[in-house]
Amino acid sequence: MLSDKNWVPPLLKTSNFANPPGPLLHRDLTISSLNYTDECMKDIDEIIKYLKKNEIDPKIALNVLKREFAPVKSGHKKTAWKMIKFQLYIWERLIDYNNNKERKRIEVVERLVYSIKYKKAYDMFPNPPFNAPKEIKNLAQLIAEPRQDKYFISKNFSEPGRPTKKLPQELLNKLR
């Protein structure tokens, strides 16, 4: 089939441009016409001009893009540690929720930071020496930070002891 001179990859056939298969690019952009490649090249040319005009190293720009659009489970140590902290926090809130207890965020964070499981998890990562008051302050601020909203989604959190069972988003919003 690859030796056939008339063979065209399925996504490049003109019949597929009339009915694109769905979101192919970030932010739900779809292929809508044959001049799509030309439009992309214009955008890339604008990016290159911007980088040159502002004297930005392309390697630095690429690293920023990779960091910004990396999936949550990207393997970055800081992101992994942050997600473990969030998971432990949600589990603590879930215990209170199941026992019909209403505690303030800072109380739950204090209880979490002083727990053995938090200290064990803390020691698994290259963190500075453990300082409980500083950890309490930082974690409480991190949880409340609006920029962390993108991490508090259902697919990132499981029930305690059931890693394949995801928490519903409505419950997650209540627990946060």
Image: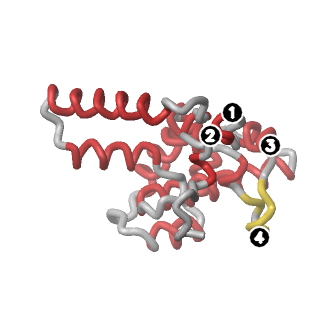
Q: CA distance from mark 2 to mark 3?
A: 45 Å
Q: Quadrant of the C terminus?
A: top right
Callout 3 amino acid:
Leu
Q: Nearer the viewer, mark 4 or mark 1?
A: 1
Mark nearer the N terminus (2 vs 4) = 2
Q: Which circle marks residue 171 in the picture?
A: 3
Labelled disc at residue 161: 4
Residue 14 tag number: 2
Secondary structure type for disc 4: loop
Query: Is residue 37 in view?
Result: yes
Q: Tell which circle, 4 or 1, labels the residue nearer the N-terminal end.
A: 1
Q: Give the CA distance from mark 1 to mark 3.
A: 41 Å
Cα–Cα gap, marks 2 and 4: 50 Å
**Sequence-earlier tag: 1 or 3:** 1
Q: Check disc 2: other Cα within 10 Å, few if <14, some if 14-19, many if 20+.
A: few
Disc 1 designates what residue?
18
**Quarter of the rendering occupied by the N terminus:** bottom right
The answer to the question of whether label 2 and label 1 lie on touching residues, with beta carbons closer than 8 A, is yes
The residue furthest front is 5
Q: Amino acid at mark 4?
A: Gly
For marks 2 and 4, give the one nearer the viewer.
Answer: 2
In the rendered image, the vertical position of residue 37 relative to residue 119, given as above or below = above
- In the image, what residue occupies the spot 86% across and 45% down? 100
- Left or right: 66 in relation to 139: left
